[in-house]
């Protein structure tokens, strides 16, 4: 089943190499300006290496810290954590679907596969709409954090989960601002892109999903 892993890695590579993208279309400009206006740059130096990151509302830094906090919440609180995710609806930031997958994996592997892939695809989608191409690399930190969860998902549930996600249209239904990943970029750009460019990104991701389904189906024959 190595082909499955290759296809998942392909989606990550797509997320890091696609052309100039930005935040979601039709997003309120005043919201974007407000978010960047309230942020600041912080830098840390280790030896000769200096790393700078954006701190403030809705930023990658804030979201990453929240995920770390949630991962420390005991499994006995799964129901409460998931209830909060459900309440957020489609406004839930893509990385949190990975935590959702981790918490349902034992009792519902297929749902875990669905959420893990939804998380990855939405991260790719958001990253490909950032003007600063470096921003999309932020998803690597999330994938590393949940590598054990993804590896533990049984292979035999992936076809059903991927087919379901391909057909239900949820990949592009998220309403959370892409600022969470765009703020990871060096330039912190909040510029928007044309609807034509957005549709090109959607088409590329849809094609990748079709390829994944076709590959899995051929391996089951």
Image (cartoon, helix red, strand yellow):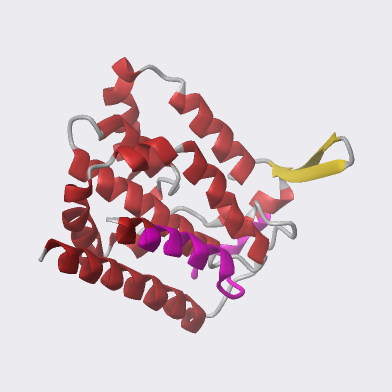
* Residue 165, position as x, y percentages in the image: 24, 59
| Above-or-below relation of 137 to 92 | below
Count the marks.
0
Q: Residue at x 33, y 19 (%)?
A: 75
Q: Is residue 16 above or below residue 206?
A: above
Residue 102 falls in which quadrant of the image? top left
- Measuring 53% from the left and 51% from the top, which residue is drawn there? 139
Image coords of residue 10 (percent x, y): 44, 64
Magenta span includes 10: yes
Q: Position of residue 11 (x, y in %)?
A: 43, 63
Residue shown at the point (34%, 32%) measured from the top left: 84
Q: Visible in this render: residue 190?
A: no
Specify the farthest residue to the left.
221
Q: Is residue 119 left or right of residue 36?
A: left
Q: Magenta residues? A: 6-33
Residue 194 vs residue 34, the one in the foreground? 194
Mostly what secondary structure, the magenta segment?
helix
Instruction: Answer whether residue 185 is visible to the viewer in this image.
Output: yes
Residue 209 lies, in percent from the top left, at 30, 68
Residue occupying the far bottom of the picture:
196
Q: Check the image and name the residue furthest to the right.
A: 48
Location of the N terminus by quadrant is bottom left
Asked if residue 190 is among those painted magenta in the image, a careful observer would answer no
Q: Nearer the viewer, residue 150 or 80?
A: 150
Residue nearer the viewer, 103 or 143: 143
- Quarter the C terminus occupies: bottom left
Judge from the rendering whether residue 86 lies leftward or rightward of residue 148; answer left or right: left
Based on the displayed image, in which of its 4 quarters is residue 171 positioned? bottom left
Query: At x 49% / y 67%, what residue is drawn?
Result: 14
């Amino acid at each position: 089943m190595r082909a499955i892993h290759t296809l998942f890695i392909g989606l990550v590579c797509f997320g890091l190499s696609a052309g100039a993208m930005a935040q979601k279309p039709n997003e309120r400009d005043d919201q974007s300006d407000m978010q960047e206006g309230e942020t600041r740059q912080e830098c840390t130096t280790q030896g000769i290496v200096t790393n700078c990151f954006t701190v403030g509302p809705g930023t990658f830094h804030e979201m990453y810290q929240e995920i770390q906090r949630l991962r420390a919440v005991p499994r006995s609180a799964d129901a409460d954590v998931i209830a909060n995710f459900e309440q957020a609806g489609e406004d839930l930031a893509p990385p949190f679907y990975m935590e959702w997958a981790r918490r349902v994996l034992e009792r519902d592997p297929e749902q875990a596969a669905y959420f893990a892939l939804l998380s990855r695809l939405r991260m790719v989608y958001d990253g490909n709409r950032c003007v600063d191409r470096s921003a999309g690399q932020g998803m690597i930190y999330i994938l590393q954090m949940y590598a054990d969860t993804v590896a533990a998902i049984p292979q035999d549930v992936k076809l059903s989960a991927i087919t379901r996600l391909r057909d239900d249209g949820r990949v592009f239904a998220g309403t959370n601002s892409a600022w969470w990943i765009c703020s990871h970029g060096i330039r912190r750009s909040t510029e928007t892109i044309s609807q034509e460019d957005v549709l090109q990104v959607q088409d590329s991701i849809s094609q990748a999903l079709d390829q994944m389904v076709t590959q899995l189906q051929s391996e089951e024959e």
